[in-house]
Amino acid sequence: MYHIHHTEGIILGSKNYGEAGKYYAIFTRDLGMVFASAQGVRKMSSKLRFILQDFSYIKLDLVRGKDLWRLTSASKTNKLDDLSKNKISFEIFSNIARLLKRLLQGEYPNKDLFNDLLEGLFFLEKSKTKEEAENIEIVIVLRVLNNLGYIGKNEKLNNVIKSPFEENIIFEANKNRLRILSEINKAIHETHL
C-alpha cells in the first residue's frame, strides 16, 4: 500500500516525456523540492491538463515511486492566477523559478522558505510598476538565499530579510538596492552554481 502525501506546491517547470506524460519540478510546502511524473496529462481528455501548468500554485497528492514521485491528483488554489498575466511579473517569476531549481537540491522541507516565497509572489502579483516589481524581485531573491543559508548576518539588511512583506519593505529595498544586489551577487557567486 502506498502512502499518499497531501501538500501544496508551486510548479517551477515541466518537460514532456513519452506520448502524453510530463515531468514536473515542484517546490512543495511539506516535502521541499520534488520531481514528479504525471502520465497522460497531455491528453485532451485529462482532467489535470489545465491544473498542472508551469508556475501555478496548486494542492497536490503525491505517491513515492521507485525513482521519483507520481502525481495522483491536483486541484487549483485559485491563488497567483494573475501573476502570469502581467509580462514583467511573469518574467520575474520565471527567473525566481530558475534560481530555485538551481539551488534546491533534493527533498528537504523548508517551510520558512516556502512561506517567504509565497508572500513575495502574492506581493509581486499586485505590483503596479516595473520598478516596484524589480524591488520585490530582489527582496524575494535575498530571502531565498537567506533561507538557504547563503546570506550571513547583515545588520543593514536585517529589516529587508526579516520584516513581513509590506509596502515599507519595498521602500527599504529601493533605498538599499545596491547593497542588496551586492549581497545577492556575492551569495550566488559563492554557491558555484
Image: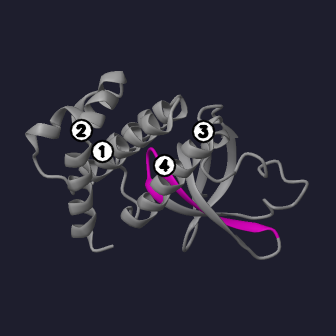
Residue 43: percent from left, percent from top: 87, 61
- Point out the frontmost of discs 4 and 2: 2
* Type of amino acid under label 3: Leu
Q: Is residue 68 magenta?
A: no
* Type of amino acid under label 1: Arg
- Point out the frontmost of discs 4 and 3: 3
* Type of amino acid under label 4: Thr
The answer to whether residue 110 shows anywhere in this view is: yes
The answer to whether residue 3 shows anywhere in this view is: no
Q: Mark 2 and 1 residues: CB-CB less than 8 Å, in contact? A: yes
Q: Which residue is mark 2?
A: 161
Q: Which residue is mark 4?
A: 28
Residue 34: percent from left, percent from top: 50, 60
Q: Which numbered marker is on residue 83?
A: 3
- Point out the frontmost of discs 1 and 4: 1
| Marks 4 and 3, the one that precedes in the sequence | 4
Q: Which residue is mark 1?
A: 143
In terms of depth relative to the viewer, which is nearer, 156 or 48?
Answer: 156
Separation of disc 1 and disc 3 at Cα? Answer: 19 Å
